[in-house]
Image: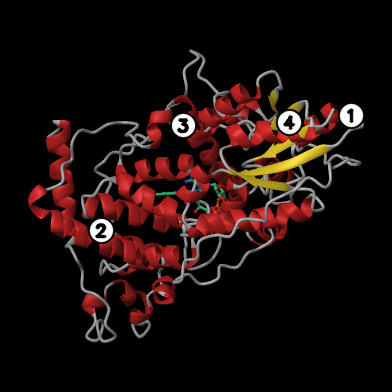
Amino acid sequence: MTAILWLRRDLRRDDLPALIAAQKAAGSDGVLPVFVLDPVLWEGAGAARQQALADALARVHDDYDGALVVRSGDPAHVVPALVAEVGATSVHVSGESTPYGRRRGTAVQTALGDVPMVATGTPYAISPGRIRTQAGTPYQAFTPFSRAWRALGYPGPAATPSGVRWLRDVPSEPLPEPDVAPEREAAPDRDPTQTWAEFLHDGLADYDSARDRPDLDATSRLSEHLKFGALHPRTLLADIAAHPAADTKGAHRFVDQLIWREFYADVLWHRPHTAWSDFRPIGDLGGDPDHEEQSAAHWQAWCEGRTGYPYVDAGMRQLLARGWMHNRLRMVTASFLVKDLHLRWQHGARFFLQHLRDGDIASNNHGWQWAAGTGTDAAPYVRVFNPVTQGRRFDPDGDYVRRWVPELRHVPGADAHEPWRTADGYADGYAGRIVDHAEQRREALARFHAASGQS
Ligand code: FAD
């Protein structure tokens, strides 16, 4: 009774309940691990996410002793064809929660007819959709959700099955070749388990105090591994619980971040439209049709890290070079696009998804809505990040800016955040500010009050 294990966002072998289910279903017959390269997802991802996926697939290929079969095409055709090819009687997956993933799953199940597609587990510690208020409604804000999440509890890691018989000699396509981004530095591809072990050892205890400092490299860098499922949050939570630092503020704050990930997946599960529409609509904040050309120039400057605000530009250049940006910078650059340049959050969200290795529709698009003031939290639209004070506070010596903006390497200390205040700030060709922050903050608030009818 051959079973197919269709891997999607769970590119690992350990702590994988769907693999256990597949082995059980197969009995003494073989399990065929399969990855379907879906052109909709592959072509929609930029070079960075394609590379992250290719790296994850190369690792999983080794984890499965070379038994992984890759096929490309629409899964609604590819999976049933493979079922027929190897005579499988069941297909095993981890449950999906994104709008596209759910639609695709339904299409595949329909195409499979009587062959069951069995979902066991999800990429989350608690499956999206499970946590509800006493009234049975979904939570709308993070804090009560996180309380309910912690109270509900989650299962421990699943054991890694031994003695699985892999089905061999099924033809596979080669691993995919990502598009090349010529300007990108080779991002260090770090082994997920080692990255996690190093963070547990060196970073967890101080995470609370250091996590907001982009100059310190104090966060876990696990986002792409969680995105593609090289590590499951269950594994991380169990390791944290067993760690001497388990009761520190650092560990508590780190678990909070994992819960943010779960929260946004839950929001998307209940309200799929919030992927691209406001969770909390404000009204029309308006572009200015007379200034379309200026908007296009502003957009281009933001994308290329040439806004003239060093902290914003450093963040955007880190994104372009590494396919990753520190969380604080994601908030600041997003706020700048929406509140200083008055462009819609959806443009920025799409750009991030094109350039992040960890690009994830739930975390990204709700993160953007958080910054835009249209999201789940009660934080009002009137919260506008000041890129200079943010920089001075979280990059107090200017090191992060100098690392990513070479034109400012000659400006010492925190002055790198305000080259306009130093005599030779522009000596190496750094661009002037494209807008005045104080002015644009007033403009953003005026637009908000006009759109929302609030005075
Ligand atoms: P750590 O600080 O070590 O956190 C550990 C893990 O917790 C992360 O790997 C991530 O899985 C999760 N996490 C942390 N912060 C958040 C958060 N605010 N929301 C959801 N999950 C979180 N995260 C993505 O994984 N993919 C995205 O596409 C993405 N886009 C974002 C866009 C914006 C505008 C904002 C404000 C945030 C976005 N985030 C996204 C969340 C966060 O910035 C990244 O998860 C984090 O910077 C990744 O670095 P890390 O793994 O070192 O994080």
Q: Is residue 259 above or below residue 271?
A: below
- Mark 3 belongs to which amino acid? Leu
- In the image, which disc is placed on residue 27? 1
Q: Where is the N terminus found, in terms of image quarters?
A: top right
* Residue at the limit of the structure toward the top, as seen here: 135
Residue 276 point in image, percent of width and height: 36, 37
Please give the name of the residue rendered at 56% of the width and 59% of the height, measured from the top-left corner.
51
The one nearer the camera, 455 or 66, is 66
CA separation in Å, label 2 and label 3: 27 Å
Which label's residue is closer to the chain start, 1 or 4? 1
Which residue is disc 3 drawn over?
268
SS at mark 2?
Answer: helix
Q: Say which of marks 1 and 3 sits in front.
A: 1
The label on residue 84 is 4
Q: Earlier in the sequence, mark 4 or mark 3?
A: 4
Q: Residue at x 31, y 48 (%)?
A: 347
